[in-house]
Image: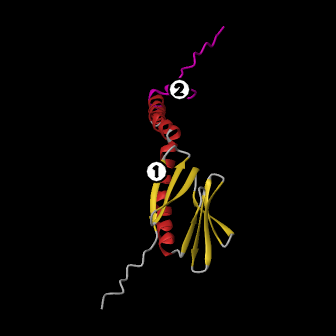
Amino acid sequence: MKTYSKKQMKSVRFINSKGFTMLEMLFAFSIFLMLVSFLPLSFNFLFHDWKFEARTQRLEWLVFINQMKKEVRIADYADVSNERIALAIAGQNVVYEKYGSNLRRRVDLKGHEIVLQEVDSVSFTSIVGGLEMIVKDTFEQEYTASLYYYINSEVSDVP
């Protein structure tokens, strides 16, 4: 009787066809380490996003105050109350007032133009020759500006 007991030889190609090689494992591990290395940066960005908003708020304040200074200078008169200011400019009434968490500008009590966002409180007070404005935002920053009216500096005695 002949028995055929043929032992199958396994080649390297068939042994590793269903698993990772060392090179594949090192490649996957290096990708994992790169992704994990960006994790602290993303946490820093997520948890400190308010700092970016606060810086943006500062720039928004600078743009707003320049516009406000221009309008106060050219105003014919101003009516200042605690939370509101009304200016008469070229026959139009311009009102600045707090509206929700915003500071808005209205012309002839029409329209609704947001000029400053994230406002917690605003106050206007009259000072000699102008007005003072104090704004507190939701980031607990306080901005103060003194705005002066245009004074006609022409002297009639000059020849």
Mark 1: give few (<14), some (14-19) or many (20+) Cα within 10 Å. few
Tell me residue 90's x, y (percent): 57, 80
Q: Which mark is residue 6?
A: none
Q: Is residue 107 above or below residue 96?
A: below
Disc 2 from disc 1: Cα separation:
57 Å
Toward the viewer: 47 or 103?
A: 103
Residue at position x 33%, y 87% in the image? 157
Q: Is residue 99 above or below residue 77?
A: above
For label 2, the residue is: 16
Toward the viewer: 134 or 76?
A: 76
In the image, what residue type sits under mark 1?
Arg
Q: Is residue 84 above or below residue 8?
A: below
Q: Nearer the viewer, mark 2 or mark 1?
A: 1
Outermost residue, bottom direction?
Answer: 159
Residue at position x 44%, y 29% in the image? 26
Residue at position x 66%, y 7% in the image? 1
Residue 30 painted magenta? no
Count of numbered badges drawn on the protein = 2
Specify the segment rendered in magenta.
Answer: 1-24
Outermost residue, right direction?
Answer: 110
The majority secondary structure of the magenta stretch comes to loop
Q: Secondary structure at mark 1?
A: helix
Q: Secondary structure at mark 2?
A: loop
For label 1, the residue is: 55
Tell me residue 91's x, y (percent): 61, 80
In the image, what residue type sits under mark 2?
Asn
Q: Quadrant of the C terminus?
A: bottom left
